[in-house]
Image: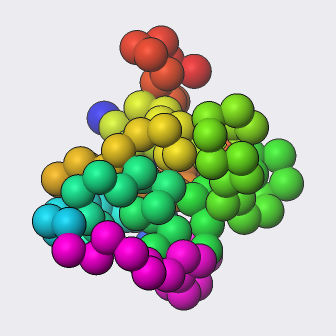
């Protein structure tokens, strides 16, 4: 099975956070993997919060290649779709980050994705 990790020569997004945590800093930490790199979040963070605490995008538009970082934050706009390394599509603003979760912001070319068990 081909890897969904981006190729090593793919452009690397800047690792400058979009969000800054100003409250609830005492929640228990967890680790997850973002584009193959181990990073930390706090239990109760949405995937969107966890990723944007690390960088300024959750994915690149499949149409324009422009960086996307979510818009509505309530599950309505479809701007925050991300994928796990095994191709499952997740809405980052309504998915809690979990210990050991492995997500990617870019897909390797030609790799199928899975939404609710259906390959796309
Ligand atoms: S940010 Fe709008 S659906 Fe997630």
Q: Quadrant of the N terminus?
A: top left
Q: Position of residue 2 (x, y in %)?
A: 36, 41
Q: Position of residue 93 (x, y in %)?
A: 53, 45
* Front in this rendered view, residue 23 or 34: 23
* Front in this rendered view, residue 19 or 26: 26
Report the number of discs: 0
Task: Kindly identify the residue that appears in the image at 66 percent across and 60 percent down.
Answer: 69
- Was residue 24 drawn as part of the magenta stretch in this picture? yes
Q: Position of residue 65 (x, y in %)?
A: 77, 59
Residue occupying the far front of the picture: 23
Q: Quarter containing ligand 1?
A: top right
Above or below for 34 versus 104: below
Residue 33 appears in view: yes
Above or below for 10 versus 59: below
User: Position of 37 compared to 105: left or right?
Assistant: left
- Span highlighted in magenta in the image: 10-26
Task: Kindly identify the residue that appears in the image at 42 percent across and 52 percent down.
Answer: 47
* Front in this rendered view, residue 114 or 77: 77
């Amino acid at each position: 099975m081909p890897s969904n990790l981006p190729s090593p020569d793919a452009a690397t997004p800047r690792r400058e956070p979009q969000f800054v945590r100003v409250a609830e800093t005492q929640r228990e930490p967890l680790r997850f993997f973002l584009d193959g790199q181990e990073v930390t979040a706090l239990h109760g963070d949405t995937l969107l919060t966890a990723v944007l605490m690390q960088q300024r995008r959750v994915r690149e538009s499949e149409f324009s290649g422009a960086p996307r970082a979510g818009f509505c934050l309530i599950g309505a706009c479809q701007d925050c779709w991300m994928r796990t390394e095994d191709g499952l599509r997740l809405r980052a603003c309504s998915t809690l980050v979990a210990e050991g979760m492995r997500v990617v912001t870019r897909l390797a070319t030609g790799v199928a994705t899975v939404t609710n068990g259906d390959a796309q």
